[in-house]
Amino acid sequence: MAENRQPIIIQEEGRRIGSFFYHVGDGFYFHFHDESFTAIYFRCHRSTCHGRAQLRLGGEFEHTAPHNHAPDIQHIEVLRRRREIVNQARTLTYMSFQDIIATVRRRIPDRNVRAQLTLRRLRPAMQRARGSVFPRLPQSLFELGNLLGDPVWSSLTQTLDEDDSLWLGSALGADGSCSSVFISSRCLQVMRLVDILFADGTFYITPSINGCYQVFTIVTIHSHTVIPLLWAVMERKTECAYTAVLTLLRTHLINWRFNLVISDFEDAIINAFTAVFAVDVQGCFFHSAHAMALHAKVTIGARTLTLLPAIMNVVRLCCALPLLPQDLVQRGMNLIGYEAMELGQEIYNIVRPYLEYVQVEWLNHPNRGRCLSVYGSNHRTNNASESNNRRMKRRIGTHHPNIFQFISKLLI
């Protein structure tokens, strides 16, 4: 005759550190409640349930009051996965709560377990865990600079191999602006060796800090691959702000060999690079052609351009002016004007305001005029910067991210 074997009581780690609960594998779980000389008493882990059990000193475990719920076989696995999620939130590798939960859920085959691991249920515990290891969110870039400059928090900007740091410092502009600059010493070394840089500003990934306006980026190209070098989180996009960022960069760079910077036609960027590094700045062929074509569409009219191919040809010739050598751009513009006059007075009257726009806003402009030509350049556009901006937008995955989330994505 088979023996009636008593179930073995299993002790499991609870949600809080140092807490435990008990079960015998039947789907019901208990907390310690009381004890006497003859028995240990347990109560159901659910506060709304009056289920009770006891363990006699002889080893007999029995339920003494019924539960008001069905057994939960998945509870142990849910707690284990919950602990894994909370521990991930406690690390200095910053991920959004949703990303942490999604990563763990993808490894769980049981859909009933996955259904219990929701952001709504886990957010409070994850917030407490994250708050125990991360500092309070800075409310300004000045506070961010003080935080990242503190050796206690140097791990926030430490590279994955722990041999370098992205934090360069804060740049204070003459206009009162503050910018936080990120570049590793290895990226500084790369910047010393390259011949060309690409610079641009982006807004979508700007961190959600009071007064933060844009993220300024500098990249380069090596073996047809875009290499991000510098990120600057800026309060303003003024010439003073750019000059402060580039001056801080020059202080650490010391020497460099690049002699050309490609950017869009933003006056502040052009003037700052010219003043700080004394290098040539080239505009973006796509930006100029797009702006000229759009102006023609708005002022002349899309229908007129479609019905009168001669006018469309004049616009196309103007868009192609950057392909000429710098000293021939004005001569090319003059030839376009002569050709427009030969089309007849009626057509010339239509295109004349547009030609004046190109002459005044582009050729005669103090910055756009000298940066317009892309003749002989291996890179006619600022697509490298645009590509990097799109890559960071996909990587961060959210509009105006948390500053710690932003920094963590730079480290990957």
Image: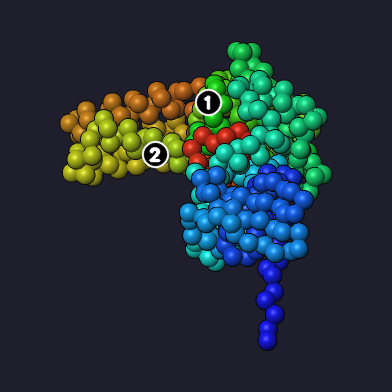
Is disc 1 placed on a helix, strand or loop? loop
Q: Nearer the viewer, residue 320 or 139?
A: 139
Dot 1 amino acid type: Tyr
Q: Position of residue 52 (x, y in %)?
A: 59, 53
Q: Residue at x 28, y 36 (%)?
A: 297
Is disc 2 placed on a helix, strand or loop? helix
Q: Is residue 306 left or right of residue 384?
A: left
Q: Residue at x 65, y 59 (%)?
A: 23
Badge 2, how many Cα within 10 Å: few under 14, some, many 20+?
A: few
- Residue 139: assigned label: none
Dot 2 amino acid type: His
The chosen color scheme is rainbow
Q: Quadrant of residue 320?
A: top left
Residue 313 visible? The answer is yes
Residue 381 visible? The answer is no
Q: Residue at x 54, y 30 (%)?
A: 208
- Residue 213: assigned label: 1
Q: Is residue 50 left or right of residue 289?
A: right
Nearest to the eye among marks 1 and 2: give it: 1
Residue that lies at the very extreme toward the front in this rendered image: 38
**Quarter of the N terminus within the rendering:** bottom right
Q: Nearer the viewer, residue 320 or 241?
A: 241
Q: Quadrant of residue 347?
A: top left
Q: Which residue is mark 2?
A: 290
Q: Nearer the viewer, residue 71 or 17?
A: 71
Q: Residue at x 78, y 48 (%)?
A: 161
- Above or below: residue 251 compared with residue 1: above
**1 and 2 marks in contact (CB < 8 Å):** no
Q: Nearer the viewer, residue 292 or 390?
A: 390
